[in-house]
Each structure stands twice: as C-alpha cells, then as structure tokens.
Amino acid sequence: MAETAHLARPYARAVFELAREKKDLAGWGGALDLFAAIVADENMAALINNPRVPSAQLQDAILETAAKFSKTSVEKLDKHAVNLIKLLARNGRLHALPAVARAYADLRAEAESVVAVRITSAAEIAPPQRKKLESALREKLGRKIELEYAADPELVGGAVVRIGDSVVDGSVRAQLQQLASALGA
C-alpha cells in the first residue's frame, strides 16, 4: 500500500498542476474518482493483473467504460485524461489509480484550505451539537472542513476525532485500555 502511494504521488502532482492551470480542480477530481472506481472493479482488476492482457487493451477498456459512465464517446473524453490512462497503462501503473485519486484529493484539499474531519462518537450527535462542533472546529483550525460523523457504541463514551492524519482519542474505551495497560493487565 505504501509503495502504491509512493508511485501515485508524482502522477497526482502532475495532474494537480494541470488541473490548477486549467482551473478545473473539481473536474479532475471527478475524473480521477471515476477512473479509480473503474480499476477497483473486481473484473477490471483481474484484467489489470493478468500479464497476458496488453496495455493497449487495458487502456481501451478503461476509456470505454469511462465514456459510458460520462455518457459520451471516447473521442470526446479530455485528451489529458486519455493521455494519463495511456501513460499509466504503458508503465504498468493502472493499479495505482485509486492512490492517485486519493493523493490528488489531498493536494486539492490543501490548495482549497479544506481539511477532512471524522468524528466517531459512542452515540449519535444531535444536529444542534453538530453545528456547534463544526463551528468550533472551523474556528480552531482556521480552515473549511469536510465533516463526517459516525457512531460506534464500542467506544462506551466520548469520541475519536480524526483531523487529516491526526487522531485525538477521547473515548472511554481508550481510557480503559490505558488504565489496563498501566495496571499491567
């Protein structure tokens, strides 16, 4: 996984620079998400991992599938997107498309001053509290946030907050685990 992420970064950076130049960050994000979903499909993944399938056939299959989803023809797909697929196919890197899409999304979020925040609490958080949390986080982080909520009763109480790559675990479960560890249990 780490190797795939390492392979994906230069492609994501190149696509990001192109998208920024064309002022189409959202369009490229959607295109990469579509390509990533196509290569993640079980049948397509089997083709990609089959050494007997030529790269030209793989790129054609991906581009034809993308054209169907975007309700257009392959000829009308963005020439830069087509070139990206051809390049990845030629270099045997089609499997890295999901990682390219994730790396691109990170670059885009950073450029747009957006940070992803996921709050997992022991119980559902009521809408008024969600608004207060969102406001407090936006003020504290000084950025726009994409907030996602989840409930996990196994936390017992409290919450786990993921801000980008950082994690703040304020759950009762974590506190109990720390106590058990301190007691040598």
Image (cartoon, helix red, strand yellow):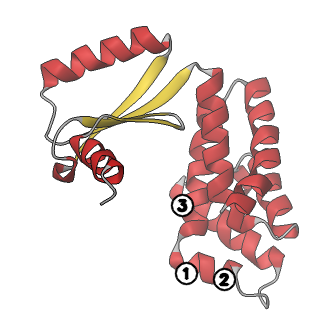
The residue that mark 1 highlights is: 43
The mark nearer the N terminus, 3 or 2, is 3
Q: Quadrant of the N terminus?
A: bottom right
Q: Is residue 1 left or right of residue 153?
A: right
Residue 27 sits in which quadrant?
Answer: top right
Q: Looking at the image, do the residues carrying marks 2 and 1 touch, with CB atoms under 8 Å apart? A: yes
Q: CA distance from mark 2 to mark 1?
A: 6 Å
Residue at 62%, 36% in the rendered image: 106
Report x, y in % for residue 161.
36, 34
The residue that mark 3 highlights is: 37
Residues packed near mark 3 inside 10 Å, few (<14), some (14 to 19) or many (20 plus): some
The residue that mark 2 highlights is: 47
Residue at 22%, 41% in the rendered image: 172
Report x, y in % for residue 102.
61, 47
Disc 1 secondary structure class: helix
Disc 2 secondary structure class: helix
Residues packed near mark 2 inside 10 Å, few (<14), some (14 to 19) or many (20 plus): some
Using the rendered image of the protein, determine whether residue 154 is visible from the camera's viewpoint: yes
Classify 29 as above or below 45: above
Classify 79 as above or below 145: below
Classify 157 as above or below 3: above
Report x, y in % for residue 15.
77, 40
- In this view, the residue farthest toward the front is 183
Amino acid carrying mark 2 in the image: Leu
Q: Is residue 86 left or right of residue 159?
A: right
Camera-nearest residue between 10 and 58: 10
Using the rendered image of the protein, determine whether residue 79 is visible from the camera's viewpoint: no
Q: CA distance from mark 3 to mark 1?
A: 12 Å
Camera-nearest residue between 106 and 162: 162
Residue at 56%, 68% in the rendered image: 40
The mark nearer the N terminus, 3 or 1, is 3
Q: Is residue 82 left or right of residue 63?
A: right
